[in-house]
Amino acid sequence: MTRVLVAMDGSPESAHAAATAVDLFGPTAEYLVANVAQSVYPLPDGVTFGAVYPMSGSEWTNLVDAADHAATATAARGAASAGIDEAEIIVEHGDVVGALCLAAEAHSADVIVVGSHDKSWIGRLISPSVADGIAHRSPRPVLVVSGE
């Protein structure tokens, strides 16, 4: 059985990539839908940059749990919109490219499917391409699906 890791960031491009994966690999493939949780940098209202704000362990845990919950919900919505009925939802943390490559390795994915956003050269300079990064860093096959 083919294990397909689909990178899902909640964008229309990632949903289109997931739907394309279903078209190509069919309903019998095992789908892993991965999202990288938003990094948590807590700065409460009224606290300026550079200020030290003491935070208890439970407050930090609540912030991380909220980020994980949002990432799980995004991945589940994307999987459902792509017609993936049974998907294993994976939430990772850290650098998006590195986290997705490590997830593919850890879960023995046969292929990584990622959507491609149409960015200008300046857009790629400011925000590098995740698809390009995965294609260059992962030893696994990578399917880059462009646009809708």
Image (tube, grey):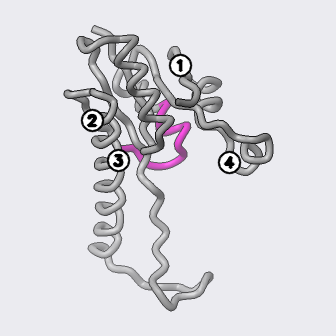
What span is colored magenta in the figure?
Answer: 91-101
Circle 2/circle 4 CB separation < 8 Å: no
Amino acid type, mark 2: Ala
Point 29% across, 49% down: residue: 73
Circle 1/circle 2 CB separation < 8 Å: no
Real-space CA distance between mark 1 and mark 2, rounded to the nearest whole angstrom: 22 Å
* Residue 53 drawn in magenta: no
Q: Is residue 83 left or right of residue 98?
A: left
Amino acid type, mark 3: Thr
Picture coordinates of residue 148, whole percent (x, y): 52, 30
Q: Which residue is mark 4?
A: 127
For mark 2, give the secondary structure.
Answer: helix
Mark 4 or mark 3, which is nearer the start of the sequence?
Answer: 3
Picture coordinates of residue 3, whole percent (x, y): 33, 17
Q: Which residue is mark 2?
A: 80
Comparing marks 1 and 2, which lies closer to the viewer?
Answer: 2
Q: Which residue is mark 1?
A: 142
Q: Residues within 10 Å of mark 4 (few under 14, many from 20)?
A: few
